[in-house]
Image (cartoon, rainbow, N blue to C red):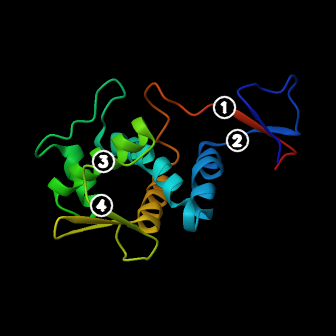
Amino acid sequence: MDYYTGKAPDEPSPTYRQVTEKEKVEIWYVEPLSKMRGDDAFICLMVCFPLLEAIMRYELAIPDDQQVNFSDNSPALHWFSVFMTIPDAEARKIWDAFRNGLLHQAMIKGTVDYDLTGTSAGRPAKAMDGRITLYVWDLRDGVVEKLKKHHRKLWRTGTSTLPTIYIRGGA
């Protein structure tokens, strides 16, 4: 497919159409994430954590100009702990080590003992005996499901909207 980002066709034509929000979320996030396997896990996490923040902001109605607060008993911390299926204290450690580490240093911080696994447990994470296990593909699947649920709304408000793109060929 030929996609044209940000620029409308020069003349209205039945051969061009604007791509919907749902289609953009599918082609930019859902499809690439769903194809990831094996050693793609690390890159998958680098994509999933910012997406989780976008989803969290949407579900908790946190404006773009406010920071996501992860203090004790904060709605964001609790939301993340429920998503990850672990206690709030462990969720805060994961957020700091994974989200902040991957986004700011392109590496998971060494502040938490963890294992990454491609096996499925039906949950994104487990905390046991001071160690956190991240089930990468279960986490990815949870993110994909949230994207499918909210695709039309996630980037419609606030200061960060998806760019307009057009597709050629009437597809």
Separation of residues labelled 4 and 1 (CA atoms): 33 Å
Separation of residues labelled 2 and 3 (CA atoms): 36 Å
Side (left or right) of 99 relative to 161: left
Nearer mark to the viewer, of 4 and 3:
3
Name the image quarter holding residue 113. bottom left
Q: Check the image and report above or below for 10 versus 143.
A: above
Residue found farthest to the front: 110
Residue visible at 52% across and 45% down in the picture: 152
Would you call the spot at circle 4 few (<14 residues within 10 Å), some (14-19), or many (20 or more)? many
Separation of residues labelled 4 and 3 (CA atoms): 14 Å
Q: Earlier in the sequence, mark 4 or mark 3?
A: 4
Residue wearing tag 2: 19
Q: Are marks 2 and 1 in contact (CB under 8 Å)?
A: yes
Residue 61's disc is: none
Residue 97's disc is: 3
- Residue 41, position in %: x, y? 51, 60
Residue 84's disc is: 4
Residue visible at 61% across and 52% down in the picture: 26
Residue wearing tag 1: 164
Separation of residues labelled 2 and 1 (CA atoms): 7 Å
- Residue 52, position in %: x, y? 39, 48
Q: Earlier in the sequence, mark 4 or mark 1?
A: 4
Q: Earlier in the sequence, mark 1 or mark 3?
A: 3
Would you call the spot at circle 2 few (<14 residues within 10 Å), some (14-19), or many (20 or more)? some
Side (left or right) of 131 relative to 12: left
Q: Amino acid at mark 4?
A: Met
Q: Earlier in the sequence, mark 2 or mark 3?
A: 2
Question: What secondary structure is marked by label 2?
Answer: loop
Q: Check the image and report above or below for 161 versus 40.
A: above
